[in-house]
Image: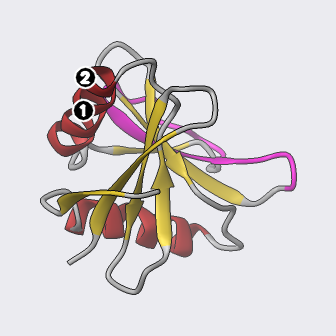
Amino acid sequence: MGKFAVKKTSNEGYAFTIVANNGEVVGVSQTYKSRDAMNNGIESVRKNANVEIEDQTLENVVEKPCPKWEIYFDKAREYRFRLKASNGEIILAASEGYTTRASAKNGIESIQNNIDSEIVEEE
């Protein structure tokens, strides 16, 4: 099973990543001002990980209500994903761009498969 890797950031905040079984970082959080806020972010990912996907790379996008996953193109025209909470805030984003839509969906599935992972402190 993967893990939620949590660490203190250089600006005295907190952040987490989701690491898959193979050691690859699949998702990254924003920086939180407190440990409690970061823990709430982890719980929000766990709560919302299995919501619908809004694929913004398609010609006829069907807009979904939040919470939702969004697949979109970045500036380099690579596929990326992000998870938005009920309030529309981004709580998790892809750690990298993908060359195919299927790879981006695999990244989402990896996160969904690892939501029950343990929380591990990192240096």
Q: Position of residue 7 (x, y in %)?
A: 43, 46
Q: Is residue 71 above or below residue 105?
A: above
Q: CA distance from mark 2 to mark 1?
A: 5 Å
Q: Which residues are magenta?
A: 59-76
Q: How many marks?
A: 2
Q: Residue at x 55, y 54 (%)?
A: 94
Q: Position of residue 51 (x, y in %)?
A: 24, 43
Identify the residue under disc 1.
Answer: 39
Report whether 76 appears left or right of 99.
right
- Answer whether residue 64 is magenta in the image: yes
Depth check: give the residue in front, 46 or 17: 17
Task: Tell me the quarter of the picture where residue 54 sits.
Answer: top left
User: Around disc 1, counting alpha carbons within 10 Å, would you say few (fewer than 14), some (14 to 19), or many (20 or more)?
Assistant: some
Three-letter residue code for mark 1 = Asn
Q: Please, what secondary structure does the residue beneath circle 2 have?
A: helix
Depth check: give the residue in front, 114 or 73: 114
In this view, the residue farthest toward the top is 87
Q: Position of residue 85 (x, y in %)?
A: 33, 25
Q: Main secondary structure of the magenta part?
A: loop
Q: Position of residue 23 (x, y in %)?
A: 43, 80
Q: Is residue 86 above or below residue 61?
A: above
Report whether 54 appears left or right of 66.
right
Q: Residue at x 31, y 27 (%)?
A: 35
Identify the residue under disc 2.
Answer: 36
Report whether 11 appears left or right of 36.
right
Q: Is residue 29 above or below residue 111?
A: above
Colouring style: secondary structure
For the N terminus, the quadrant is bottom left
Task: Tell me the quarter of the picture where residue 15 sits.
Answer: top left
